[in-house]
Amino acid sequence: MCGGGGIPARDAGPAVDLVVCLALLAAQAATPADSLEQEHVTGTLGVALDAQLSRYAEYGFWGTVLVVRQGEIVLLKGYGLANAERGTPNTPATRFEMNSMTKMFTGLAILQLDAAGRLHVTDPVERYLGAFPPGKQGSTIAQLANHTAGLIVQGTGLDLSSRTAFVNDVKRTPRESPAGERYRYTNAGFSLLGALIEIVSGESYEDYIRRHAFAPAGLRTALFRDEVRLADPLYARGYVGTPATLERSPQIAYGWGTRGSGGVWSTVGDMYRWVVAVEQGKLLPEPQQRTLFSPTAPPALEAYGWHVDTTDEGRPRIHKGGGSAEVASQLLYYPRERIVIVWTSNNLRQRWRQALNRTISQVALGDGVPLLPALARRPKHMLQANAGRYVAGRDTLELRAGLDCLYAAASSFRVPASIPFYPQDSTSYIGFDPNTGTQTRLHFGQGGALSVQMADGRTFSLTR
């Protein structure tokens, strides 16, 4: 990934040699300022990606997707709604909460302070956060950044009202594991890094990130959760629910325990601009930059907000996801192929992460992916005509009419109760599970007959 925001091609694994891509990066910098808030569907690859995502939108996906290949924006487009109540569509200019992708900014800030000599990542955290009790001493900043510090037992309730209260609560709680011994992903650890950034820099966490990450990277839209104006149509609302309902999720409070670990809102285009800036060397000197993009040592699986690994097929890959109850986001890039993907999703009636990561990557890498069957929307009264109780022997399957689909109640048949079944035509319905990529099919025959084809190949027949 270089040019339009890519890591250079290389043969030596995921470490980054930025010099190779300077010419292409300069060309990207000359792109019109608003190009990353405009729709792009470019070439056969863009058309193929748009076809897949448009079909996913028929099955309930809402969000915005950016795909760049070898410096060219091949797809930048919104799908579904940013605000269901107002009917506002998602677009390339829609701002989304990036959740744990915020950790990339926090990790970068720590490495900047390390480069400036204001801290050292090998320092114990108590050097900056004050004395820890016996048994909790010795965890380093680097271990906080790679989730191996072991300072906080999973599920511990912490005081989030202020930085001081939060840090003191971390100090008083039991240690989860010895420093450096065990990897466990923890938001609270990155909030401790946020506190450390404030103490070392003398600035608020938000001011530091604005001045030292957002501004030099040229980000136009990035801000923090407490600055978001949800009444503004540019900001996507998050939705949850079931096949029967669509519910608007309330905005999460922005307090300690969130600072440093989440809270950044942005467009997908600005997240892309930020990666370009990191690679251009605008934000970090080369030694810290190499640390950021190098594989982590066991037991860690992630460091400074990034995963650096290889796929099952042996492709180098650098990635980070974010998620909450109502919004999901993802950054993926494949440095050898120079492909970057950024997507967001704001309708989590179903969780689309696995389907989006799998399908967008496969299509962008040149692998064929069959389209899901086309759907035919049916009015509510037609859905209700197929709803009801169906029996086979002593067992019963109940189908109910939802907003625009049928859905199954829990039953001994194990027909998935969490996925919507959309009409393909007047007699056939398809349920798609984005987590597994599998399909379950319903076919309604004459005289109240129902045939069910399960994702695992099982079939059975029922009747009213």
Image (cartoon, rainbow, N blue to C red):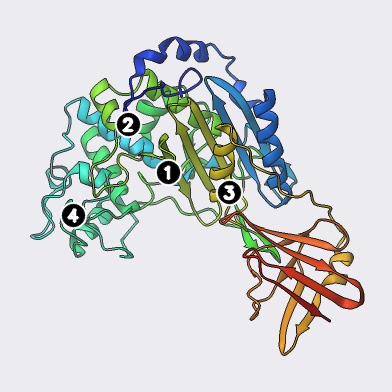
If you read the primary sequence from the N terminus, does the residue marked by circle 1 or circle 4 appear first?
4
Which one is in front in this view, the residue at disc 1 or the one at disc 3?
1
Could you say where residue 88 lies in the image, as x and y percent from the top left? Answer: 72, 42
State yes or no: discs 1 and 3 in contact (Cβ < 8 Å): no
If you read the primary sequence from the N terminus, does the residue marked by circle 1 or circle 2 appear first?
2
If you read the primary sequence from the N terminus, does the residue marked by circle 2 or circle 3 appear first?
2
> Residue at label 3?
355
If you read the primary sequence from the N terminus, does the residue marked by circle 3 or circle 4 appear first?
4
Q: Is residue 60 above or below residue 35?
A: below
Q: Residues within 10 Å of mark 4 (few under 14, many from 20)?
A: some
- Camera-side residue: 277 or 5? 5
Q: In whole angstroms, how far apart are the C-alphas of marks 3 and 4?
A: 33 Å
Secondary structure at badge 4 equals loop
Q: Is residue 131 above or below residue 305?
A: below
Residue most extreme to the bottom: 394
Instruction: Say if residue 90 shows up in the picture.
Output: no
Residue most extreme to the right: 447
